[in-house]
Amino acid sequence: MVCSTKIMRLLTALTVLLLVSSVATAQKKFKKLVWSDEFSQNGLPDSTKWGYDLGMGCPALCGWGNHELEYYTVKRLENAHVENGLLTIEAKKEQYENAAYTSARLVAKIDSGWKYGRFEIKAKIPAGRGIWPAIWMLPSDHSLGQWPHSGEIDIMENVGYWPDTVFSTVHTGKYNGMLGTQQSKGHAGKDFSTAFHVYGFEWDAKALTFFIDDNKFFQFKNDGTGTEAWPFDKAFHLLLNVAVGGDWGGKYGVDDAIFPQKMLVDYVRVYQ
């Protein structure tokens, strides 16, 4: 028993060393800071760094294709503002245009997007049934076809009725939510809405690798079979948003008593 205990301790120590080594190697590989926002200026998000998606999406107000219920506003302090070093994206219960809720969907402003790198977003997410916050990436162009063929990378998603788990997910033509074949993994925790965590993502020609607080928990590898499985050799851009309802977030309805709800972001950093 003593011998077995010692072996287990050695194996645990070795595992920790390997994880630390893996993170250090990744950070050394992607060490040049090429874009960031530390949210140091109060007011609206920096217009040189952030744009917005407007409305409910699609020509016929179809909730961005997910049957979401919010109206995404533009340059409205009530839904997106910076204060005391934090970006706040706030979902509110209010009548606005044709919607019963408002929120914001921010898009990183960089003409060419990014191809490969390490992305770090330190955030505290909202909570409550019907809330659906996300930190994610879409292709800067859709040269391989419309969703999902050109790809989607979900660095962090949470649905409010499942508060103790955040998810990282990859969508492609071969692997996607419409087919039920999306490649995804959840990470359990008890304080996602009460504490800040660093949601990290590394991307190169071989794999997409996801981290929480520098702990690797999910990897999607390039299997070499072509763009239907791996459309990730083109530039993508970053999005931050808080949705209300939707096919996943609203699966069990929306609790109107929870509003307003906020996602707080301490920083966004991109390394290449």
Image: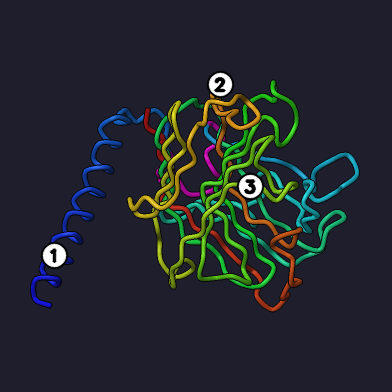
Q: CA distance from mark 1 to mark 2?
A: 51 Å
In depth, the one of 82 and 257 nearer the eye is 257
Pinpoint residue 126: horizontal percent, then vertical percent: 56, 65
In depth, the one of 91 and 239 nearer the eye is 239
Q: Nearer the viewer, mark 1 or mark 2?
A: 1
Please tell me the numbered disc located at residue 74.
none
Q: Secondary structure at mark 2?
A: loop
Please name the amino acid that badge 2 sits on.
Answer: Ser
Q: What colouring does the structure picture have?
A: rainbow
Q: Nearer the viewer, mark 3 or mark 2?
A: 3
Please name the amino acid that badge 1 sits on.
Answer: Ile
In depth, the one of 231 and 133 nearer the eye is 231
Q: Circle 3: is it few (<14), some (14-19), or many (20+) Cα within 10 Å?
A: some
Please tell me the numbered disc located at residue 182.
3
Q: Circle 2: is it few (<14), some (14-19), or many (20+) Cα within 10 Å?
A: few
Q: Residue at x 46, y 66 (%)?
A: 188
Residue 39 seen from this side: no
Residue bounds of the magenta highlight: 37-48
Pinpoint residue 256: horizontal percent, then vertical percent: 73, 75
Q: Quadrant of residue 227?
A: top right
Asked if the magenta segment contains residue 45, the reply would be yes
Q: Vertical placement of 90 versus 155: above or below?
A: below
Q: CA distance from mark 3 to mark 1?
A: 38 Å
Precedes in sequence: disc 3 or disc 2:
2
Q: Which residue is mark 2?
A: 112
